[in-house]
Image (cartoon, rainbow, N blue to C red):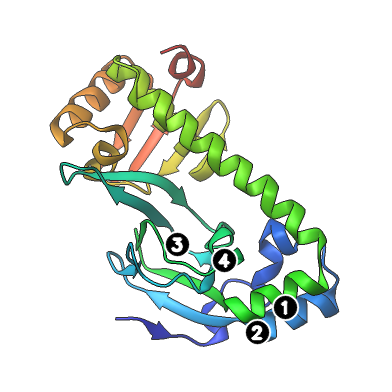
Amino acid sequence: MLNTCNCSACNDKYCAKKVSLFSNLDTNQILKVVNKIDHKSYKKGEILFSEGDIADRFFIVNKGSLKVYNYTKDGKEQILYILSESDFLGDLNLFKEGVFDYYAMALEDTALCTLNKQDFNHILLENPEINLKILDYAYERITTLEKLIQTLNTKDINTRLANLLINISKNFGIKKGKEIEITLPLSREDMASYLGLTRETVSRHLSDLQNQNIIKMIGNKKMVVLDMNELNNL
């Protein structure tokens, strides 16, 4: 179930400041945004919304991570995006009356800041420069989906997996010398869902990469990229 949380549960007093859409607003403008925000928390595995739900809210990831996904015609889950702290969701849906055409789920315990459609539109009217940032972000989302299509059309499984690990490294990795340490946001099942593979295939190819000293797995949730150049060359 969805719970309302206190502001103290958030990472940042002005959580809206984390989001690129609002990053150029001055303190008074940010305060206006923050005063309209509702704070919500979701447990790992909880659904934010489903396909067909009314799209009437803007979501900011304040802590944790989400997966945005849909289902193929044969009922298989296909992950579209992974969102982490400071990412946002639902912006384009607020420009028109409609419903979500995808699902969103918390990958871990996650704190969100949300704005309703009326408040979000009011902020856009007061700060029209935000619209240009939304267009930039929409372009990034389209590019991400295009890359996903290219990945799914790539027959070489190592190349598919390498592309995913590179993307995860950029968004979730911490560089330590020549290595990159990552707390994986995705389970093996989620990786398989993203890549259109089976869990067993993903696990086998992760082991292959580890045997080649390209990565090092630490349990199920942590990974170290030992050789990013080699990963890029796959």
Q: Is residue 77 above or below residue 11?
A: above
Asked whether, in this view, residue 112 is left or right of residue 74, the answer is right
Closer to the chain start, of discs 4 and 3, is 3
Closer to the chain start, of discs 3 and 2, is 2
Marks 4 and 1: CB-CB under 8 Å?
Answer: no
The local secondary structure at tag 4 comes to: loop
Residue topped by disc 3: 64
The local secondary structure at tag 3 comes to: loop
Position of residue 66 measured from the top left corner of the image (x, y, whole percent): 41, 58
All told, the count of numbered labels is: 4
Q: Is residue 179 above or below residue 84?
A: above
Closer to us: mark 4 or mark 3?
A: 4
Query: Three-letter amino acid code at disc 3?
Result: Gly
In the displayed image of the protein, which residue is found farthest to the front? Answer: 97
Marks 2 and 1: CB-CB under 8 Å?
Answer: yes
C-alpha span from label 3 to label 2 = 22 Å
Closer to the chain start, of discs 4 and 1, is 4
Marks 3 and 1: CB-CB under 8 Å?
Answer: no
Closer to us: mark 2 or mark 1?
A: 1
Position of residue 192 measured from the top left corner of the image (x, y, whole percent): 24, 37
Residue topped by disc 2: 36
C-alpha span from label 3 to label 1 = 28 Å
Query: Three-letter amino acid code at disc 2?
Result: Lys
The quadrant in which residue 126 appears is bottom right
C-alpha span from label 2 to label 1 = 10 Å
Closer to us: mark 3 or mark 1?
A: 1
C-alpha span from label 2 to label 4 = 20 Å
The local secondary structure at tag 1 comes to: helix
Q: Residue at x 83, y 75 (%)?
A: 27
Query: Three-letter amino acid code at disc 4?
Result: Lys
Q: Nearer the viewer, residue 71 or 223?
A: 71
Numbered circle sitting on residue 96: 4
